[in-house]
Image: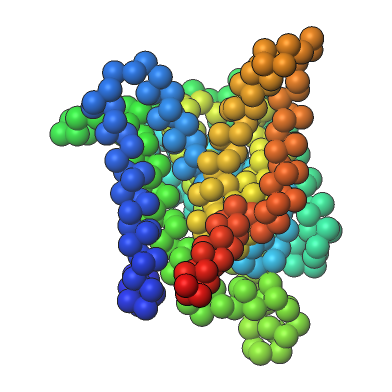
Amino acid sequence: MAAMARSWATKPHIGLWAIGFWLVLAALPLIGFVTESPSFEYYLFMGQSMLIYAIAVLGLNLLIGFNGQISLGHSAFFAVGAYAAAILMVHASVPYWLAIPLAGIVCFGAGFLFGFPALKLEGHYLALATFTLAIAVPQLLKHKSIAGWTGGVGGVLLDKPDPPAFLPLSVDQFLYYVCLIVAMALFWIVYNLLRGRSGRAMMAIRDHAMAAGTMGIDTALYKTMTFGVSAAITGMAGALSAITVAYVAPDSFTLQLSISFLVGLVVGGIASLPGCLIGGAFIVLVQNSSQSISDWMKDAFSLRYDVPAWAIYGTLLLLLMFFLPNGLAGGITAIRGLFSRATQKT
């Protein structure tokens, strides 16, 4: 908090923008009190999904963007977090608010242990190792030896937590605020982590591991710790997903989910905290709107055949990467810089 206060003291507009942004997100569920639109609950669920994916992208960004380690297997930690929360809530009657951090602790241990053998791997070798992790974990969750806990192929059903009696909120509104509070807390923690000694050490390893080692930085410790913290953040996102959807199944955590996290990171902006929120929104909005765009194109241009939704998704992604190679957050920063220079000249 002190680090954030110093940053806001030197650049108060950053703090004001951040506060305003989170206040807008907090006010969105209150629209339900003034509208009776039947689609409101659907949009509220989309908002929950955006926050959950933003948290998952935040965990991946900490590893790739700020420490330079490549991962294609964060869907595995997302799955472990989701199942940890589900098992704790169903089999141990642990309340949801305790299951979320406990799932993060379980994933921290899993990520830290995986980080040890990964120390000898770099670049595409590490990517390949995490790739196998993403493929193996969903299959392991189906194994008959643990099917009594994981439900096997059928998965686990959960009950959504009810809001406290003193809060005039629906279940979906309440869960939105749970996701928002967890997201705010994790973004604040990562923000302060990156501004401290640990964050500077992580980024020094990213820029040049050998030079960081000669300066006395324990590169092995920081790499494994970063992997653990990254897995913990993504695991907490998985726990939130399990609670909001009220269901977990192995086939929900495929390699495609890991690719979606990576796409969200690149589109939002690598090594950018606001980019994580943009990336989370991109994952949900584009994947949900691709089919609608496909249907519109077929009707508008009188096409005989449907335009594949994934073709639209891929085309949009290519255009974004061509015109905004630093992601949407980088593009916004560049436009703001151009505007600032133009106003100074005038």
Q: Quadrant of the N terminus?
A: bottom left
What x and y, as percent, mark residue 346? 47, 72
Q: Residue at x 73, y 44 (%)?
A: 319
Q: Which coloring applies here?
A: rainbow
* Residue 117 sits in quarter: bottom right
> Which residue is pictured at 53% across the width and 72% down the height?
341
Q: Residue 137, relative to residue 56: is it above or below?
A: above
Residue at 28 percent across and 27 percent down: it is 32
The residue lying toward the viewer, choosing from 211 and 86, is 211
Task: Determine whether 173 is above or below 188 in the image.
Answer: above
State how many labels appear.
0
Residue at point 27%, 34% (across, down): 30
Can residue 96 be seen? yes
Q: What x and y, as percent, mark residue 222?
A: 62, 72
Q: Is residue 79 above or below residue 153?
A: below
Position of residue 193 measured from the top left corner of the image (x, y, whole percent): 48, 69
Q: Quadrant of residue 254?
A: top right
Measured as percent of width and height from the top left, residue 74 is found at: 65, 48
